[in-house]
Image (cartoon, helix red, strand yellow):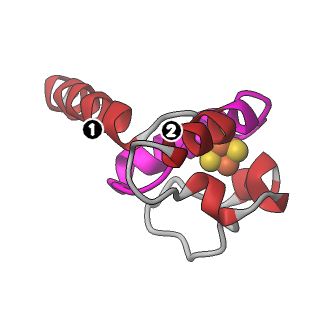
Amino acid sequence: MALMWNRTVDWDNGDWRQMAACRTTEPELFFPVGSTGLAVDQIEAAKKVCGNCEALSPCLDFALATNQESGVWGGTSEDERRKLRKQWLAARRRAS
Ligand code: SF4
């Protein structure tokens, strides 16, 4: 997955993208179509790449902060990230 877009949040200086383990993998792995059948294998394979990625934490932060709804980010699937984002938003509300 090539993470090439511009900054969208103040704290994101983009450095983490240089450490992204997915820079040299097939984008289809990280953006499978659907969540059943072959997509299940692709999601699991993408998560394994994330598991060895130095950018996992900032990648997940970015995905939550910018509400990335599609694909695997920071070792999480779309469904997992939806749940995480609810918790993340609740924590932000409590902190403000
Ligand atoms: S955590 Fe996963 S999706 Fe994020 S940069 Fe690393 S390999 Fe790519």
User: What x and y, as percent, mark residue 73?
Assistant: 53, 45
* Above or below for 84 versus 30: above
Q: Could you tell me the amino acid type at mark 1? A: Arg
Q: Which residues are magenta?
A: 48-74
Q: Is residue 66 magenta?
A: yes
Amino acid carrying label 2: it is: Val
- Residue at 15% in and 31% down: 93
Q: Which residue is mark 2?
A: 40
Ligand 1, what quadrant? top right
Q: Nearer the viewer, residue 78 or 10?
A: 78
Q: On the rendered image, what quadrant is the C terminus found in?
A: top left
Point out residue 52 in the picture as x, y percentages from the top left corner. 79, 30
Q: In the rendered view, tell whether residue 65 sits above or below residue 44.
A: below
Q: Tell me: residue 1, above or below residue 51.
A: below
Label 2: how many residues lie within 10 Å, few (<14), some (14-19) or many (20+)? some
**Quadrant location, the N terminus:** bottom right
The residue carrying mark 1 is 82
The residue drawn where x is 65% and y is 42% is 46
Q: Residues within 10 Å of mark 1 (few under 14, many from 20)?
A: some
- Marks 2 and 1: in contact by CB < 8 Å? no
Query: 41 or 69: nearer the eye?
Result: 41
Q: Is residue 35 left or right of residue 38?
A: left
Horizontal side of residue 79 vs 13, given as left or right: left
